[in-house]
Image (cartoon, coloured by chain):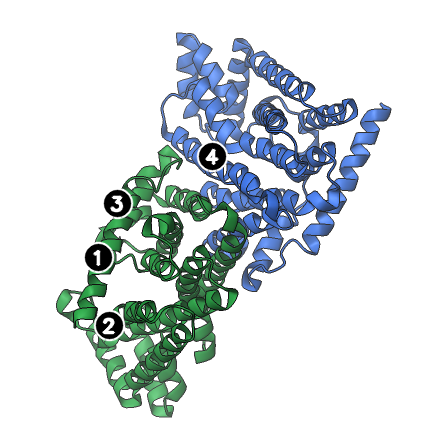
Chain colours: A blue, B green
């Protein structure tokens, strides 16, 4: 309990430092006519998990929060750029309870806002880290293109009749998880970690990110709605989540027929409860929880085989566990 | 005549080398599911002026076409990324006689395509130029954000009642001209030019780019339509071009009233001829030609005061003149 409290306090201190930097230096040199829309997304309440990962990994290799901050914010600006453009494509009206950028400022300004945030994130990444810029950029630019590749697969899956579990895992690796991997790798690069340790940290972030996304899918159906988050949002969109893909892969003929009918079910409550029933019959909750455990184990394995101190290994593992312990 | 022929042959050789690189190495490592849409825009017939500027500037400082190619293509990929997103915002159906990316592949894929092209262009910029990456990125990332700032101003001008000539010049500086400035500056950086010479080359590109954009505005009204380019496209859109802004600034009360009426004119031919008549009365063609000459003079001045050899100065000036000698 004491350690968990300690790490949670650490995270809160880092989250506050991140917010402070976001409110002061983060948008230095940014186009003035795009600052309002950029601040709008950047200042939404959030856990700031990705920049925290940079800071924690950097700390493990002896780099102060101050020295790692600009690279951490680069990851956060990049992440927020993808949110701005994803919300356009998803036609989302609201993000974290607040109007989306394109709804508030128009689609055109939202496109341009994201387009300015991306090069700005590259500038933040190398700011003060010029002597490491080749390694930092190699990791960051590869990640950036993989995220786009993943986003494209995600959109293609909407109209693709069947998606295999392997295709789905590859999609979430690209769309969601490589960013966590890159965040940890960048922290390691800043700390002059060996190439092996950079890879271990990357793997830790990647596996944690994969588990994180499956948790996200899991909570859509099996989450706790006491905090007001709608259960079944993905179900209503016929979204090919880890749960649905596994259900379709394991369903018998009768279940297949029911799934096909449920795709066209107009009654929202009937649709959600219908899918929940099938998910329970097939046992996809267990499949998802087993997969998360497998991925979590791999993330722990990666960290344990790294050159971090025992104390820093513990901290990284606890960070991963906090990420995966949410119930909403 | 002989020199002009020679430089045109040079440009054609470089254009072919650019196209060859585009067809082979340019998209190495690019997301496979976004290659089709990226090739679609990258392989449109074009003059390739921006990468040629990189190559010519680099050549002037002793860098071979081969060694400057990847940075030159970075500029071209960046430029094409902006075209893909601009076409979405302009709802353009056709570019250079070919269907636009968002019309062919859908708006969502066009957004993601551009989003992947931008980090790819950064990767090309530093490829093989790692030891100069800090300087290259400083120029490139500043330019990238300025282009977005300019695009945002351009969109704001559509609904802004009055735009001053100064505001307009600032907008085209950002949206169009800094990319030409950056192209030349990057060539100079690759050739280890002094900071002063980097600035001279930047200024040459910037002034040439400004004149190039005013030429573009001029040709919309006063161009030669023998090659089938529609005259008056900007007029029909009520676009605040250099011509219209100067006309509005210099119009008397009666002309102001006619301009206001013409904004709402539905008959396309009447609208175009009405604006042409006012432009002639006010003499905006001369204002535009004078401005182009002034900018061209400044570009020549910048090159002449640089450390380039007399032969390379002549080549750069001829390149600028070829850019400004088009009639359509």
Q: In the structure shown, which secondary structural element does the residue marked by tag 3 occupy?
A: helix
User: Which residue is at the front of the view, B205 or B290?
Assistant: B205
Whether labels 3 and 2 share one chain:
yes
The chain letter under disc 2 is B
Left or right placement of residue A249 versus residue B213 in this view:
right
From the image, state whether disc 2 or disc 4 is nearer to you. 2
Please say if B9 is above or below A213: below
Left or right placement of residue A2 versus residue B288 in this view:
right
Q: Give the image quarter of residue B267.
A: bottom left
Residue assigned mark 2: B325
User: Which is more N-terminal, label 2 or label 3?
Assistant: 3
| Quadrant of the rendering where the N terminus of chain B is positioned | bottom left
Residue at 43 percent of width and 79 percent of height: B165
Residue assigned mark 3: B20
Residue A247, x across and y down, in percent: 48, 15
For the residues labelled 4 and 3, say whether their Cβ atoms are less than 8 Å apart. no
Residue assigned mark 4: A146
> Crowding at label 4, few (<14), some or many (≥20) Cα neighbours within 10 Å?
many
Residue at 20 percent of width and 69 percent of height: B4
Whether labels 4 and 3 share one chain:
no
User: Which is more N-terminal, label 2 or label 1?
Assistant: 1
């Amino acid at each position: 309990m004491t350690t968990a409290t300690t790490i949670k306090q650490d995270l809160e201190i880092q989250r506050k430092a991140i917010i402070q930097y976001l409110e002061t230096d983060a948008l230095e040199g940014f186009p003035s006519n795009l600052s309002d829309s950029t601040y709008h997304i950047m200042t939404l309440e959030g856990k700031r998990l990705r920049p925290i990962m940079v800071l924690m990994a950097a700390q493990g290799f002896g780099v102060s929060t101050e020295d790692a901050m600009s690279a951490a914010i680069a990851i956060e600006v990049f992440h927020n750029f993808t949110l701005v453009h994803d919300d356009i494509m998803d036609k989302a009206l609201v993000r974290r309870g607040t109007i989306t950028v394109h709804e508030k400022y128009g689609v055109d300004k939202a496109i341009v806002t994201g387009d300015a945030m991306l090069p700005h994130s590259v500038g933040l990444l190398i700011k003060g880290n010029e002597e490491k810029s080749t390694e930092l950029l190699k990791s960051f630019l590869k990640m950036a293109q993989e995220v786009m590749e993943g986003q494209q697969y995600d959109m293609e899956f909407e109209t693709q009749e069947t998606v295999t579990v392997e295709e789905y895992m590859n999609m979430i690796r690209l769309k969601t998880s490589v960013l966590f991997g890159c965040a940890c790798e960048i922290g390691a690069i800043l700390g002059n970690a060996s190439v092996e340790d950079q890879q271990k940290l990357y793997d830790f972030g990647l596996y944690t990110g994969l588990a994180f996304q499956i948790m996200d899918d899991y909570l859509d159906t099996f989450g706790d709605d006491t905090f007001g988050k709608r259960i079944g949002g993905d179900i209503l969109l016929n979204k090919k989540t880890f749960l649905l893909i596994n259900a379709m892969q394991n369903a018998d003929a009768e279940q297949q027929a029911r799934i096909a009918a449920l795709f066209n079910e107009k009654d929202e409550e009937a649709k959600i409860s219908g899918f929940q029933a099938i998910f329970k019959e097939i046992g996809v909750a267990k499949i998802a929880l087993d997969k998360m455990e497998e991925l979590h184990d791999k993330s722990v394995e990666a960290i344990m085989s790294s050159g971090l101190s025992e104390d820093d290994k513990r901290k990284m593992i606890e960070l991963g566990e906090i990420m995966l312990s949410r119930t909403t």
